[in-house]
Image (tube, rainbow, N blue to C red):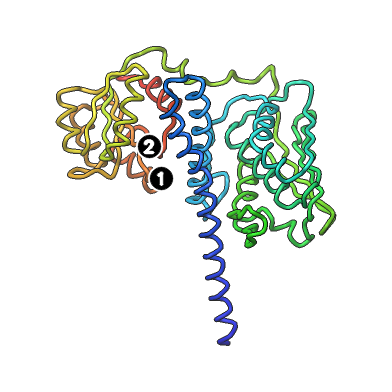
């Protein structure tokens, strides 16, 4: 029995090594354009076009990095319960086009020919464009990765009576029959080869499945076997135009109302960047760096909204929230903005008196919408 046990240990060690190597690759990829973007913006000499171009690039990379971190934290249960979506009524075609453009250079470097067929009439779904684009991107990268140089990739979207079918076919290495049932499982696709040039985490197809199911759809893998190529199909429910809700806009929620906001965070960089953003959004802002200071500033400033971290020195966020709620009742809206997530931390936040529990990082439109929805009692 000794040798099998040793084999299990060695296999676990190899898996850990491969996973860490793949993780390092996936995390470092977005960091390169981020560092380059910062350097280029510093040298832009106020050139608005250059600044806007690189800010857009950096925002896209930060979103991908944020999604990767979320996926890793949720890898123990990557399903519809662990993913957060920002859904609205959206046309599917622009999401597909954006995903293609983001991967066009990769496809060209691999010598593949890509064809795309999209419906002539608008095809609307209730979806999150970032997450759907990420899912389509995973399918495109898989097709590139597992198709020998000079292959063909065909992407099409067909509109049915109730469903949109996104199909991605390739002329690649195909999928063995015994893998078709497990290929969407977490870590099933962990790539152990250096030759591919793309060491995946094995989370991609699990993420695709979770995203599609969260949108009320299904995903399928089809292949005639090794060497026969493969096809992935995403089936997504359509939103009927006559019953579709208008897209949600954060700026409409804001309505120009100026709030008194107290931001509490012990990280100076977080406090500095968020306070500037809140000020740009038109609000009156004060900053505190620990729970005790937050109580002193609140007594003087009388904020309508307190956006507060949980892990604070001197007085933690939970205790500070209890004290603020005891002093001001429902006249103040308490928002936890923290790196802690999950049902346990959400429950503790509610028990402490927080009205909302948000997980870092927060994007500008989320912050704008949040402050726009505040209605002091």
Percent position of residue 360, x then y = 40, 39
Please name whichever residue, 151 or 76, is drawn nearer the observer in this view of the structure. Answer: 151
Percent position of residue 362, x then y = 42, 34
Percent position of residue 338, x then y = 35, 41
User: Residue 357 bears which disc, if any?
Assistant: 2
Do callouts 2 and 1 mark residues in contact (Cβ within 8 Å)?
Answer: yes
Question: From the image, which quarter does the C terminus lie in?
Answer: top left
Q: Quadrant of residue 179?
A: bottom right
Q: Quadrant of residue 100?
A: top right
- Which element carries disc 1, helix, strand or loop? loop
Q: Residue at x 23, y 25 (%)?
A: 286
Q: Residue at x 16, y 38 (%)?
A: 292
The residue that mark 1 highlights is 341
Please name whichever residue, 160 or 69, is drawn nearer the observer in this view of the structure. Answer: 69
Please name whichever residue, 64 or 260, is drawn nearer the observer in this view of the structure. Answer: 64
- Which element carries disc 2, helix, strand or loop? strand
Q: Residue at x 73, y 21 (%)?
A: 122
Question: From the image, which quarter does the N terminus lie in?
Answer: bottom right
């Amino acid at each position: 029995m000794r040798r099998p046990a040793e084999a299990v240990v060695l296999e676990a060690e190899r898996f850990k090594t491969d996973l860490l190597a793949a993780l390092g690759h996936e995390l470092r990829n977005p960091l390169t354009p981020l560092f380059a973007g910062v350097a280029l913006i510093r040298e832009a000499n106020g050139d608005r076009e250059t600044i806007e171009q690189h800010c857009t690039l950096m925002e896209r990379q930060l979103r991908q990095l944020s999604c990767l971190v979320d996926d890793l934290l949720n890898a123990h249960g990557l399903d519809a319960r662990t993913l957060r979506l920002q859904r609205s009524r959206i046309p599917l075609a622009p999401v597909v086009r954006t995903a293609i453009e983001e991967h066009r250079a990769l496809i060209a470097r691999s010598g593949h020919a890509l064809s795309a067929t999209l419906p002539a009439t608008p095809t609307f779904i209730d979806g999150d464009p970032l997450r759907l684009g990420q899912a389509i991107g995973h399918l495109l990268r898989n097709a590139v990765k597992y198709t020998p140089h000079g292959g063909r990739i065909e992407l099409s979207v067909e509109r049915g009576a109730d469903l949109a079918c996104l199909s991605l076919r390739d002329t690649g290495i195909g999928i063995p029959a015994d893998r078709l049932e497990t290929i969407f499982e977490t870590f099933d696709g962990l790539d152990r080869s250096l030759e591919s040039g793309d060491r995946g985490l094995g989370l991609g197809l699990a993420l695709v499945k979770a995203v599609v199911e969260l949108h009320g759809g299904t995903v399928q893998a089809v292949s005639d076997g090794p060497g026969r190529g493969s096809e992935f199909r995403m089936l997504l429910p359509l939103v009927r135009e006559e019953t579709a809700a208008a897209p949600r806009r954060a700026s409409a929620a804001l309505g120009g109302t100026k709030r008194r906001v107290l931001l509490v965070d012990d990280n100076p960089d977080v406090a500095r960047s968020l306070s500037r953003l809140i000020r740009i959004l038109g609000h009156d802002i004060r900053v505190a760096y620990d729970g005790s200071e937050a109580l002193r500033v609140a007594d003087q400033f009388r904020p309508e909204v307190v956006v507060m971290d949980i892990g604070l020195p001197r007085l933690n966020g939970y205790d500070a929230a209890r004290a603020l709620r005891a002093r001001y009742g429902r006249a103040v809206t308490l928002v936890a903005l923290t790196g802690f997530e999950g049902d346990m931390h959400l429950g503790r936040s509610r028990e402490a008196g927080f009205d909302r529990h948000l997980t870092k990082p927060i994007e500008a439109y989320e912050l704008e919408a949040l402050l726009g929805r505040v209605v002091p009692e």
